[in-house]
Image (cartoon, rainbow, N blue to C red):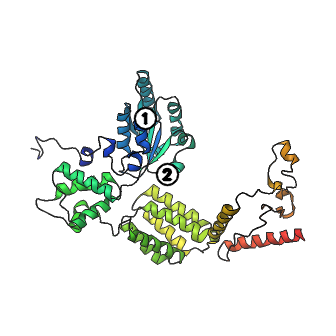
Amino acid sequence: MSLFAGSAPRSPLAERMRPRLLAEVAGQDHLLGEGGALRRLVDAREMGSLIFWGPPGTGKTTVARLLADGTDMAFVQISAIFSGVAELKKVFEAARGRRAMGQGTLLFVDEVHRFNRAQQDSFLPVMEDGTLVLIGATTENPSFELNAALLSRARVMVFRALDGAALEALLQRAEAIEAHPLPLTPQARRALIEMADGDGRALLTLAEEVFRAATPDEMLDVAELANIVQRRAPIYDKAQEGHYNLISALHKCVRGSDPDAALYYLARMLAAGEAPLFLARRLVRMAVEDIGLADPQALVVANAAREAYEFLGSPEGELALAQATVYLATAPKSNAVYKAYGLAQGLARDKGSLTPPKTILNAPTSLMKQEGYGSGYQYDHDTENAFSGQDYWPEALGRQKLYAPNERGFERDIRKRLDYWEKLRNEQNE
């Protein structure tokens, strides 16, 4: 006889706590609060296609469902991971049928970035003719993962990871539903919130494990909590000082060419639960800021490590981050491009209204030709050494020197080229 015979299993806590009203959605006040972009759409009862961009567990699916309810549209949900062209055609046909009967369709596509370009393009006609309203959810930057045609027809709404206050409010609602407090010490309660890493669904799943496992009158500390949920409490709070201290330490170790220390801090951050893609982005930043053109492959390696992690996931993908860290730490260093760009920004800010010389401007009209646009321009490939040496700077500004490559790595070769071209330029001007 089953231990659970005669009793129906309860729905998961996260499902029982799913908001029934937009006002109950936690942590997205910038979208749903007074004057928020989504709040205005509901109040106006007019809905256009949207892209919800944000981390997992921030309410994207729930908000889409509530938007459909608030605008009297049929809610249809699919996942780009499991859906293909055949299913999309069925969804579009059903939406056309509802439209003919006077009802709109809100199609929610989870992981919309997983669709390829052709699949993304298939949404365009039904979005344009009003067959359906698309809400696509993605954890990835839409600018990189969605094609321009789709983005031009949908507004992007950014969902934020839930902060500590929003997660605490969720815990209090969970305690009210369960009719008793979580059996956690204050320190363990904070650790539970940190384990969730801004993900409300993950927090409620962890809390449910605690409710189930704790015995009557038991009060769990941090170690006992970690043992129950089989998840390590973070060594530091990623929103506080420890987070910034360790990422600063990692960056300085790479800049200082110490691969051993850099690996140590990388491992500490990963063990603490730091988001690996945050670390991958910082490695890319180190490649362009501190190595630059001293080793042009540094950026390639850092980007490849990011892609490898996305492909492999954790823990296998962490080795790609470690490999990139060692490569960057042992690469020749240069901040010449970093400094040159800073100087260029200053010039653009202070002298940004100056007109380029007419010799390098096109003359698409006869009037512009009469005014001298393009006159005197020298096509470098037609000159000796494929170098004309002409002046490209605004006349009022004159030639400026911004980029000064150093003598390390590949920049040594770049310096030789620049010195050679400067020599040719001087000879032509004598």
- Judge by depth and name the residue closer to the eye, 203 or 365: 365
* Left or right: residue 172 compared with residue 133: left
Q: As rendered, which of 22 and 144 lies closer to the eye?
A: 22
Q: Which amino acid does label 2 sit on?
A: Asn
Mark 2 or 1, nearer chain start: 1
Distance from Cα at disc 2 to Cα at disc 1: 28 Å
Residue 220: x and y in percent read: 18, 64
Crowding at mark 2 (Cα within 10 Å: few <14, some 14-19, many 20+) = few
The kind of residue on which mark 1 rests is Ala
Q: Residue furthest top?
A: 101
Residue 39 against residue 187 in the figure, above or below? above
Q: Is residue 38 left or right of residue 398?
A: left
**Can residue 428 be seen?**
yes
The residue labelled by disc 1 is 44
Helix, strand or loop at label 2? It is loop
- Does dot 1 land on a helix, a strand or a loop? helix
Picture residue at 77% right of the left edge, 73% below the top: 419
- Residue 141 disc label: 2
